[in-house]
Amino acid sequence: MAAGRGPKRRRSKNARGAGARRSAAKKASADTTRGRPKRGSSTPRREQDAFGHRAKAEGYPARSIYKLEEMDRRVGLLKRGQRVLDLGAAPGSWSLYAAEKVGPRGKVIGLDLQPHAIERALPACLELRVGDARTLDTASLGGACDVLLSDMAPKTTGVRAADMYRSYELFRVAVDAASELVKPGGAFVGKIFQGEDFDEGRAALKRVFKRVRTMRPEAIRPESYEVYLVGQEKRPERLPEPS
Ligand SMILES: C[S@@+](CC[C@H](N)C(=O)[O-])C[C@H]1O[C@@H](n2cnc3c(N)ncnc32)[C@H](O)[C@@H]1O
């Protein structure tokens, strides 16, 4: 997939020049790389709908593809020949994108409580399983991976504090899996809601990866509390928890 093909933006009366847009993008990126990013800084609804239409036209089951694509473009996560584990993989956009990026010599295993909804033939390097990441059988994965992705999200209840906490728990499951399964030097992307436990989630990831940054891709709905924590350069040993 070609990078950088976001939905077309309408040029408004107030449209700025390329220089101004670049510095705005730089500022947005700076906002999201240190600590908590600002909520509501994503793209408006009309453009959000365009992400959905584009995903359908390009054969991806969910618009979330463009979240991973943007993070991959900005950070350079996925490379040919890599092994990838994708937790919370259904309906399947991230797994499909990752399989396309790693190519036939790579391997992507996607796991979800739900079956996938990909409507085209799966690439040979992609295996999608139904199962619970909280009881992951690591021995069945065939070895360590280069990148662990987690877009896991709890079924929301409408009780904000409870939803935030469940998201944090799933994030910690993904960090523990990364600690065990990602090769030294490898990378991680995990979804987390911006709640009380966000800082603790970030600190937990920092004990496993040398570099951690917070990202809020444009395809996240403006009203959403979700962000992604990206870990790079997995440490050879996890640092101990502070006592
Ligand atoms: C936002 S969706 C993921 C979308 C996916 N990245 C894509 O691009 O198609 C979140 C997924 O997390 C899954 N999930 C939640 N808890 C899980 C768990 N304990 N184990 C595995 N998957 C889980 C849900 O079933 C849901 O399909």
Image: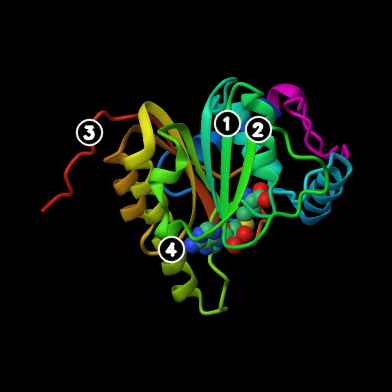
Q: Looking at the picture, does residue 27 appear above or below residue 65?
A: above
> Along the polypeptide, which appears first: circle 1 or circle 2?
2
> Along the polypeptide, which appears first: circle 2 or circle 4?
2
User: Can you identify the residue that label 2 sits on?
Assistant: 99
Foreground label between 3 and 2: 2
Q: Secondary structure at mark 3?
A: loop
**CA separation, marks 3 and 1?**
25 Å
Q: Residues within 10 Å of mark 4 (few under 14, many from 20)?
A: some
Which disc, if any, is residue 195?
4
Q: Secondary structure at mark 4?
A: loop
Looking at the image, in which quadrant does ligand 1 appear?
bottom right
> Along the polypeptide, which appears first: circle 4 or circle 1?
1
Instruction: Look at the magenta stretch and give its main secondary structure.
Output: loop
For residue 157, side relative to residue 120 (left or right):
left
Q: Amino acid at mark 3?
A: Glu
- The location of residue 64, given as percent across then percent down, is 68, 48
Q: Amino acid at mark 2?
A: Ala
Q: Is residue 9 magenta?
A: yes
**CA separation, marks 4 and 1?**
34 Å
- The location of residue 239, given as percent across then percent down, is 20, 39
User: Can you identify the residue that label 1 sits on?
Assistant: 107
Q: Looking at the picture, does residue 81 appear above or below residue 197?
A: above
First to last magenta residue range = 1-20
Q: Secondary structure at mark 1?
A: strand
Query: Residue 88 versus residue 163: which sits nearer the camera?
Result: 88
Q: Residues within 10 Å of mark 1 (few under 14, many from 20)?
A: many
Q: Is residue 117 visible?
A: yes
